Amino acid sequence: MVFPRESSKSDKIDAKDRISELPEPIKQHILFFMCPEDAARTTVLSKTWQQTWNSLRRLSFVSVDLGCTKTLEILHTEKVIIQKFKVLVLQEGAASLSCIDKWLELVLGNYINELHLHILFFEYTLPKQMFAAKSLAILNLIRCRLVESFFDENAKFTRLKELTLEKVVQDGNAIQELLNRCPMLEAFSIDNCLNVYCLKLFNLPNLKMAKINRVRMFYINKAPNLHTLCCRVKISIICSLRTTYNNLRKLSIGIGYNSFDVMYLPRLNSMFPLLETLDFNDIRRLDEVKISHGRLESLSLSSKFNTITG
């Protein structure tokens, strides 16, 4: 008979996590050589790695000076996490455009959380690498140009929670493409953007606030957690009549040419059961409006000639 040899201590697998016991500077150095997304994922490994991630340098950076490139190069080399990067460009010219391209190249290489681009005197076309910034949680664009062809087929902003677009110019259907790639969006605002004929908010389970201003047509469906909806559109707003918006508390509507009052006001109780505030502008025949809702606390109705509040 052959008896199995008892395993010695040296034969046993050492299950001890020796990497986590490395000195903090060495663990930080390891994170520096990882891409931002993978480095952030180490926080779920253990409390030790979470502490290492939290110990990395973080910075909020606001730039109105075209000469800040050197500073950003240093921050990029040191892998400083850019918590917030805000660019306010007041100067026109090719030099300004090249500087913005360089800045984005530098900050997008770090784990950037919040990005604000305020371009005041010209339209700036966002570079294609911009849409690879998967760490973004907040994106605010003023007077920029979005190009539909820049989006990769499988590209998604999986962490983006707040999106604000003002005076943005789109090529093709770029804004809709951007929205379709933000599955975790919680707040969306659009105002005075060009070439936006129709906008759709579909399949956004986390969306809580939407402010839609100066678009022609607007559709919304499958946004079960929507709390606030403010719309100022030129032609029509379409909500699915089969959908109940159980969490909607505030509804503010302004329409130039539409039958929203005829289609939806009689269904307020069934479609918006928890509605508390209703602000309805540009009603065609104010004297014909009938509203009945058990939870409504604030009401404002207006036409071109009359206003009623209560």
Image: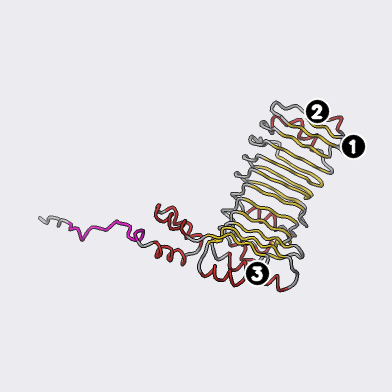
Name which residue lies at 82% across and 41% down.
258
Closest to the camera, between mark 3 and mark 2, is 3
CB under 8 Å between discs 3 and 2: no
Cα distance between the residues tagged 3 and 2: 54 Å
Q: Secondary structure at mark 3?
A: helix
Main structural element of the magenta stretch: helix, strand or loop?
A: loop
Total count of labels: 3
Q: Is residue 300 left or right of residue 86?
A: right
Mark 3 or mark 1, which is nearer the start of the sequence?
3
Q: Residues within 10 Å of mark 2 (few under 14, many from 20)?
A: few
Range drawn in magenta: 7-21
Name which residue lies at 62% across and 68% down.
103
Question: Which of 286/67 is in front?
Answer: 67
Residue beneath disc 2: 290
Q: Name the amino acid type tagged 3.
A: Asp
Q: Secondary structure at mark 2?
A: loop
Please say whether residue 198 is one of the residues in the magenta stretch: no
Mark 2 or mark 3, which is nearer the start of the sequence?
3
Residue beneath disc 1: 305
Query: Which numbered marker is on residue 101?
Result: 3
Q: Residues within 10 Å of mark 3 (few under 14, many from 20)?
A: some
Residue 56 in the image, given as x and y percentages of width and height:
48, 60
CB under 8 Å between discs 1 and 3: no
Cα distance between the residues tagged 1 and 3: 50 Å
Residue 200 in the image, given as x and y percentages of width and height:
70, 48
Quadrant assignment for the C terminus: top right
Q: Is residue 77 left or right of residue 185?
A: left
Residue 86 in the image, given as x and y percentages of width and height:
64, 60
Mark 2 or mark 1, which is nearer the start of the sequence?
2
Q: Name the amino acid type tagged 1.
A: Phe
Q: Secondary structure at mark 1?
A: loop
